[in-house]
Image (spheres, rainbow, N blue to C red):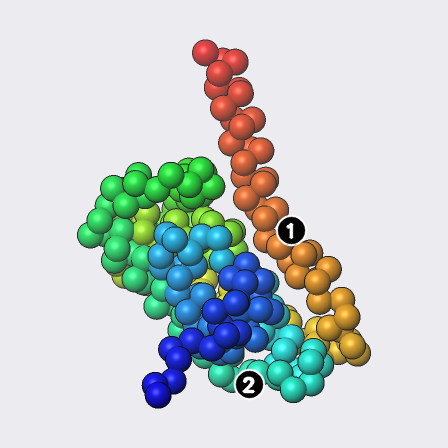
Amino acid sequence: MAAPLFTAAQLAVNVLDARSLLAAFGVAGIALVMFAETGLLIGFFLPGDSLLFTAGLLCTGTADRGSALSLPQVLVASAVGALVGAQVGYVIGRRGGRALLDRSRSRRLHEGAVRAEELLARYGHAKAVVLARFIPVVRTVLNPLAGALGVPVRTFTVWQTAGGLVWSIGLVLAGYALGSSVPNVDRYLLPIVALIVVVSLLPLAVELVRSRKRAAREGGAS
């Protein structure tokens, strides 16, 4: 009898819960989530920031003693998934253009596209590509958008690599450092992850407030 393609734990996984993803798929799940979140528009809802941080924390073995992950493997999986995903997203955007984004009915995705275009217009290609890595949803949308808008391949590749390495490796090492220095830190994992989510959303919230203020000023001036 052939072995099942997925285990019961994998079929029951909660894709919005970093710990559930890691328990079900381990290091392979990190690479897949990084790829989907940064390369495929359907991955905008995935918990990239909290997944990287939690994976780093689990590398210390302080959370659920038997579930420690290998730090080198986590670092490689995180970086490869993030870099390959972004490059694939760029290629998809270059070939498919804005039509792919326009077909989506997700309001959150379209709001992310507006923020991504504002970043590109305000900061230029290089800085926008790096900054987008640290803003949920925007990091999903900016890569195909950069391809659709004709950002040069070399410029995009160099800066998405730089931003991707800082973002992915930085969050993993932050989780690892915290787990190594704070005893029984797993007791506080949920509030820590919640804090990470809030902090990661701050740039998007600030940018949204600024854009609304600009729109109000422009409307008042007219």
- Find residue 97 and report its horizontal and vertical position in percent: 24, 45
- Residue 198 got which mark? 1
> Which of the 4 image quadrants contains residue 51?
bottom right
Residue that appears at 47% across and 41% down: 108
Local packing at callout 2 (Cα closer than 10 Å; few below 14, some 14-19, many 20+) is some
Vertical placement of residue 183 versus 89, above or below = below
Q: Quadrant of the C terminus?
A: top left
Q: Is residue 194 left or right of residue 136?
A: right
Residue 31 image offset from top left, x and y in percent = 43, 72
Mark 2 secondary-structure assignment: loop
Q: Is residue 214 above or below residue 113?
A: above
Question: Which kind of residue does numbered mark 1 sit on?
Answer: Val
Tell me how many marks there are. 2
Which comes sooner in the sequence, label 1 or label 2?
A: 2
Q: Position of residue 29 (x, y in %)?
A: 47, 72
Per the model, the C-alpha gap separating discs 1 and 2 is: 27 Å
Give the labeled residue for mark 2: 70
Q: Is disc 1 placed on a helix, strand or loop? A: helix
Query: From the viewer's perspective, is 110 left or right of 15?
Result: left
Residue 209 in the figure: left or right of residue 177: left
Q: Amino acid at mark 2?
A: Ser
Graded by Cα atoms within 10 Å as few (under 14), some (14 to 19) or many (20 or more), the crowding at tag 1 reads few
Most distant residue in the top direction: 222
Q: Nearer the viewer, residue 117 or 35?
A: 35
